[in-house]
């Protein structure tokens, strides 16, 4: 009920802002773009470049030996390079979209530089998933997918998509590399975790579809990722090449469910995973390390990216690679060969086929373009296939009106972008969603929550780092919590007598726990505590605090800040254990994710826990025993 009111005002807001910032057309103009004619006018080099999407995170202006600076504003060297190549688009990072004004100006300058030699506007893509993966400085961070899963309301996924989409459109970006449609069934997954809606395929499918509908409603392109699925890996493809060795039947029952749902809902873009899926393609290519056979990663597989995704699953949109500078690709295949292979596999757009940090580095793009030209000359790839792919790209650009001339002044667009990014409605929705996600797994009537405090109370606050301390304290102050606070950021420190003294001097204890990989042998475990050996800070410190609070009979709230699986470490805690699903704190004057504030609000009784676990949490001692099942959550 409440949401539908917020939703309608959000929609109204987007409609009123809709005409201005983005490349929205005056009706009629856009339809005159003749895609076939445009393609016929492109040179071969321009066609290949249309399939490439570089980043411009940092730049060594005036030569690579100079100091690199974040690209917050356009510079002449970059502008000239963009003009020269006619790329398909750009991917922007946090370094580029620092605030509404800079981001709007930068994107505008990029489109202008591109327009010098190209009639085809750029895709401007951002990883604005919401939650722990957000780039837009001063944008709304949102609590993230797993928190949305915990609220049990897919309308929250719709709102997340609508808000991120509208903020990106406001700065002139047009692609959101989201939603993450991975099913996080592996509790050891080091890279997806809270980026996933949960561990049940249907829950992920339902929410991913709502998210993508929300992004689309804002006039922004949405991109389901990481196909065929990055949820069941214990390796991060940023650092290694994961293998998912499951049968087709198993994959059909889990990983593919959300992607099928997205395709049925007409998703415009799908991003690949740099993951081996032998059940889908067990072809091998030479490993550049030693020439040994390497099962082809999905990103480079024609069987997966063309035969299966387009043929079997019926995807008609634009496919795009995950970043090609990730270790899974560069260490095993090499970036030039990998880009050519991805193109031959039928992937339409290649993200970051090379890292360019100065003008000289653009020769890397020449290498990529020359390699594809050679493939065409060698008949490994045909110009027809190239054109088919270009046509899909241009059709999508046309569908989202990117060809329409921008008629609003830059000043007006900045004003709208400022207003959109700081829209109080976005922040209100964000707060409500984070609050409704807080999941209480364990509580004790005497030593648990809600904490009752007064002027004589002293709360000891332990968080992994200072930004989370700042977020917690600021929240307690804004809620008017009556108590004094002592705080301690504990990353890389040991539980010792100083900490004991802090607890002795307090009446209540709040501690954040942050573990991405729930392996007792790696992150700590009883052996470390009991023998006094050093475990990872992430486990041993919170466990020490929790045990000491029990000994001294202090109420304690343990907040799981990221993947909820670390909650299983606190079985013997006397107090409360709750999950927030997001760890980014308050930094540099920017209020971070809403998750920690929502958890603090719950601890002090200003809101009630309503979340239900969107994953199964196994015991830390025996992963075949589920300690807290999917759907679990206590009420107060
Ligand atoms: C934004 O752009 C201005 C110049 O237009 C620049 O001085 C400033 O450093 C940029 N960054 C931020 C964070 O404002
Ligand atoms: C935007 O973010 C910057 C830090 O990147 C911060 O200094 C500034 O106060 C923020 N502005 C607003 C309006 O939130
Ligand atoms: C996949 O699993 C099967 C069955 O356990 C095994 O025979 C095969 O070697 C595995 N493949 C890889 C690449 O590990
Ligand atoms: C970029 O160019 C500089 C200077 O020529 C070189 O040192 C650096 O290795 C290049 N970067 C890449 C990724 O090739
Ligand atoms: C946008 O916001 C920034 C920082 O809050 C401010 O300095 C600037 O004047 C605003 N620009 C417009 C056009 O409102
Ligand atoms: C809380 O701090 C104030 C000063 O900031 C002090 O006057 C007061 O005595 C403290 N209360 C407790 C319970 O320590
Ligand atoms: C406990 O650890 C903290 C942080 O490393 C340190 O500052 C403090 O001196 C230590 N206390 C004792 C009693 O060793
Ligand atoms: C569960 O534990 C077993 C035994 O320690 C281990 O072999 C297996 O890899 C674990 N499962 C996952 C998903 O990590």
Image: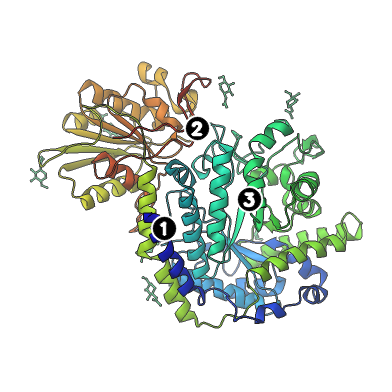
Location of residue 568 in the rendering, given as x and y in whole percent from the top left corner: 42, 26
The residue singled out by tag 1 in the image is 4
Q: Dot 1: few (<14), some (14–19), or many (≥20) neighbours within 10 Å?
A: few
Kind of element beneath mark 2: loop
Location of residue 596 in the rendering, given as x and y in whole percent from the top left corner: 34, 45
The residue singled out by tag 3 in the image is 262
Query: Quick one: quadrant of the N terminus?
Result: bottom left
User: Which circle marks residue 517 in the picture?
Assistant: 2
Q: Nearer the viewer, mark 1 or mark 3?
A: 1
- Between the C-alphas of marks 2 and 1, the distance is 38 Å
Q: In which quadrant of the rendered view does residue 246 lie?
A: top right
Is the residue at mark 2 in contact range of ligand 8, meaning its CB lies under 8 Å from it? no
Location of residue 74 in the rendering, given as x and y in whole percent from the top left corner: 54, 72
- Between the C-alphas of marks 3 and 2, the distance is 29 Å
Q: In which quadrant of the rendered view does residue 371 lie?
A: bottom right
Q: Are marks 1 and 3 in contact (CB under 8 Å)?
A: no
Query: Quick one: quadrant of the C terminus?
Result: top left
Q: Nearer the viewer, residue 463 or 3?
A: 3
Q: Dot 2: few (<14), some (14–19), or many (≥20) neighbours within 10 Å?
A: some
Taking the image as four quarters, which one is ligand 7 found in? Answer: top left
Kind of element beneath mark 3: helix
Q: In terms of sequence position, does the residue under pointer 3 or pointer 2 come before the other?
A: 3
Q: Nearer the viewer, mark 2 or mark 1?
A: 1
Q: Residue at x 76, y 38 (%)?
A: 280
Residue 489 versus residue 1 in the image, above or below: above
Location of residue 551 in the rendering, given as x and y in whole percent from the top left corner: 23, 20
Kind of element beneath mark 1: helix
């Amino acid at each position: 009920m409440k949401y539908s009111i917020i939703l309608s005002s959000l929609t109204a807001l987007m409609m009123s802002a809709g005409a201005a910032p983005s490349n929205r057309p005056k009706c009629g103009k856009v339809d005159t773009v003749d895609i076939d004619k445009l393609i016929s006018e492109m040179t071969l080099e321009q066609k290949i470049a249309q399939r490439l999407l570089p980043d411009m995170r940092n730049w060594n202006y005036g030569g690579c030996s100079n100091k690199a600076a974040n690209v917050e504003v356009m510079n002449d060297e970059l502008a000239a390079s963009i003009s020269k190549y006619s790329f398909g688009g750009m991917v922007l990072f946090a370094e580029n979209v620092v605030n509404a004004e800079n981001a709007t100006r930068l994107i505008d300058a990029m489109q202008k530089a591109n327009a010098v030699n190209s009639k085809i506007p750029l895709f401007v893509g951002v990883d604005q998933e919401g939650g722990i993966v957000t780039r837009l400085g001063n944008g709304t961070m949102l609590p993230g997918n797993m928190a949305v899963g915990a609220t049990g309301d897919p309308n929250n996924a719709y709102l997340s998509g609508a808000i991120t989409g509208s903020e990106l459109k406001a700065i002139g970006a047009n692609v959101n590399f989201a939603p993450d449609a991975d099913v996080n069934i592996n509790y050891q997954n080091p890279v997806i975790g809270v980026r996933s809606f949960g561990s049940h395929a249907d829950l992920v499918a339902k929410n991913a579809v709502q998210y993508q509908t929300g992004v689309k409603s804002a006039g922004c392109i949405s991109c389901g990722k990481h196909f065929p699925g990055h949820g069941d890996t214990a390796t991060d493809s940023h650092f290694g090449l994961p293998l998912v060795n499951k049968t087709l039947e198993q994959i059909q029952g889990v990983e593919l469910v959300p992607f099928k749902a997205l395709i049925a809902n007409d998703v415009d873009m799908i991003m690949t995973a740099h993951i081996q899926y032998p059940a889908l393609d067990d072809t091998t290519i030479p490993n550049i390390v030693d020439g040994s056979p390497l099962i082809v990663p999905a990103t480079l597989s024609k069987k997966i990216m063309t035969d299966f995704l387009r043929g079997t699953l019926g995807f008609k949109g634009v496919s795009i690679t995950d970043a090609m500078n990730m270790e899974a690709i560069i260490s095993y295949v090499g970036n030039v060969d990998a880009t050519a292979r991805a193109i031959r596999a039928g992937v339409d757009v290649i993200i970051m086929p090379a890292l360019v940090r100065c003008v000289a580095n653009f020769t890397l793009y020449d290498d990529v373009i020359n390699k594809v030209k050679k493939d065409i000359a060698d008949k490994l790839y045909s110009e027809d296939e190239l054109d088919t792919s270009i046509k899909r790209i241009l059709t999508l650009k046309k569908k989202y009106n990117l060809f329409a001339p921008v008629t609003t002044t830059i000043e007006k667009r900045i004003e709208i972008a400022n207003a959109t990014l700081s829209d109080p409605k976005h922040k209100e929705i964000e707060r409500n969603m984070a609050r409704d996600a807080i999941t209480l797994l364990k509580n004790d009537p005497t030593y648990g929550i809600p904490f009752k405090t007064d002027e004589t109370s002293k709360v000891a606050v332990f968080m992994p780092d200072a930004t989370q301390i700042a977020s917690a304290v600021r929240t307690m102050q804004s809620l008017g919590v009556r108590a004094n606070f002592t705080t301690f950021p504990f990353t890389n420190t040991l539980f010792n007598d100083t900490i004991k003294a802090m607890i002795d001097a307090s009446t209540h204890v709040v501690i954040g726990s942050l573990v991405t990989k729930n392996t007792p042998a790696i992150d700590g475990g009883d052996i470390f505590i009991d023998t006094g050996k050093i475990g990872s800070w992430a486990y041993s410190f919170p466990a020490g605090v929790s045990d000491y609070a029990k000994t001294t009979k202090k109420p304690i709230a343990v907040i799981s800040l990221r993947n909820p699986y670390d909650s299983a470490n606190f079985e013997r805690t006397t107090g409360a254990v709750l999950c927030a699903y997001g760890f980014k704190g308050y930094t540099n004057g920017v209020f971070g994710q809403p998750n920690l504030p929502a958890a603090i609000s719950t601890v002090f009784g200003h809101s009630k826990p309503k979340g239900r676990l969107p994953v199964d949490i196994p015991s830390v001692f025996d992963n075949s025993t589920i300690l807290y099942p999917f759907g679990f959550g206590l009420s107060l």
